[in-house]
Amino acid sequence: MDVYDALRFSVARISNELFSAGSIFSVYSLATTFVIAVCALAYQRKKRRGRANLRAIARAIFNRKILLTASFAADVKLFVLSVVLMPVVVGALVISSNAVATAVSAGLRSSFGATAPVACCDLSIKLVSTVVLFLAYEIGYWVDHWLKHRIPFLWEFHKVHHTAEALTPVTNFRNHPIDNIFFGYMLALFIGSAAGALAWFFGRTTESFTVDGKNILFLFFLWTIGHLQHSQFWIPFRGLLGHIVLSPAHHQIHHSADSEHFNRNFGSVLAVWDWMYGSLEMPSRTNPRLKYGVEEEGVDPHSSFGLLATPIVKAALALWRALADAWRAGIERMEQRRQRAKSTGVL
Ligand SMILES: [Zn+2]
Ligand SMILES: [Zn+2]
């Protein structure tokens, strides 16, 4: 592949990301988000000041101060990397959810016997399948995210997302490639297992409501509040709604540099998993003007080196420390057993 081919390939990938309805960064999803942001800001300003100045709202949405930050430039770099290269890498490395589904349904058939194919109710089955696969995505996302905050080796890669100091919809792409690959495995595991269980239960492969192969419920949330989770607009859901759906403000709390907010609101769209686990942090009604980012000594978290190489070195050190701790704990346990055996006269 020469430079011209590489350029053509990159442009095709980026235009596919922008113009296919099922993509995460489609212009359609950005347009609906823009309309929702204008309405939400106009409502908030009218309530606060008695009138809504549309020019001021447009200035707030396209905030030059944010677009000129090193943090935003780093988001754009990772956007290009992840849109151009990641589909190739993830596609080659990650097992597909179809392979997991086939293995799970075969496992269920051999453990519990085959079920007769359900010959009716196509629409209801499609509806059930759409909801179940959406829930599988949501649980997979939560578990993946929780693990990345609990395990130091994984945190070093996930930290790249948290070093963003200004949140914009492009921050969604601010992920280390290894973080993306791990996410791909987790999704294949959870969505594939759910699809396999559905296929076994209904005795046949089920279909879901999709657009461009993406679950319609996932797209509904992406086209409404998804992009606003990475934005500077404080749009809080409170009360019962805030216990069920994560508002943009919920995710902004997840990015907060305040240690009181660490390890809160792990979910994607649904707040119920955080509610059940006890990690749900409800946003306040008024904007607390949160500071975002992670303190990193001696590293520029927005440079290409800081974004891509530093996490690999730090993750390797974290893994080394974990292995050394496990080794030391093993030796201590062996010594304690030897001492016990000696004192009871076995040795
Ligand atoms: Zn996180
Ligand atoms: Zn985020």
Image: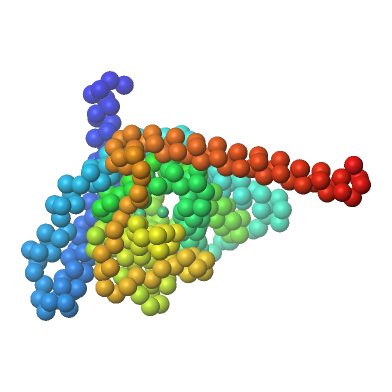
Which corner quadrant of the image does residue 1 belong to? top left
Which scheme is used to colour this image of the protein? rainbow
Horizontally, residue 223 falls left or right of residue 182, namely left
Residue 245 pos. (x, y %) = 39, 68
Q: Residue at x 35, y 49 (%)?
A: 295
Q: Going by the picture, which residue comes out furthest to the top?
A: 2
Task: Pick whichever, 291 or 121, lies toward us.
Answer: 291
Task: Ligand 1: give its quadrant.
Answer: bottom left
Horizontally, residue 347 falls left or right of residue 70, namely right
In the figure, 46 relative to 97: above or below?
A: below
Q: Residue at x 32, y 42 (%)?
A: 301
Task: Pick whichever, 266 or 343, lies toward us.
Answer: 343
Q: Residue at x 71, y 50 (%)?
A: 110
Name the quarter where the C terminus is drawn: top right
Residue 52 pos. (x, y %) = 11, 72
Horizontally, residue 93 falls left or right of residue 72, namely right
Residue 199 pos. (x, y %) = 57, 54
Residue 287 pos. (x, y %) = 26, 69
Task: Pick whichever, 108 or 169, lies toward us.
Answer: 169
Q: Residue at x 10, y 76 (%)?
A: 51
Task: Pick whichever, 59 or 213, lies toward us.
Answer: 59
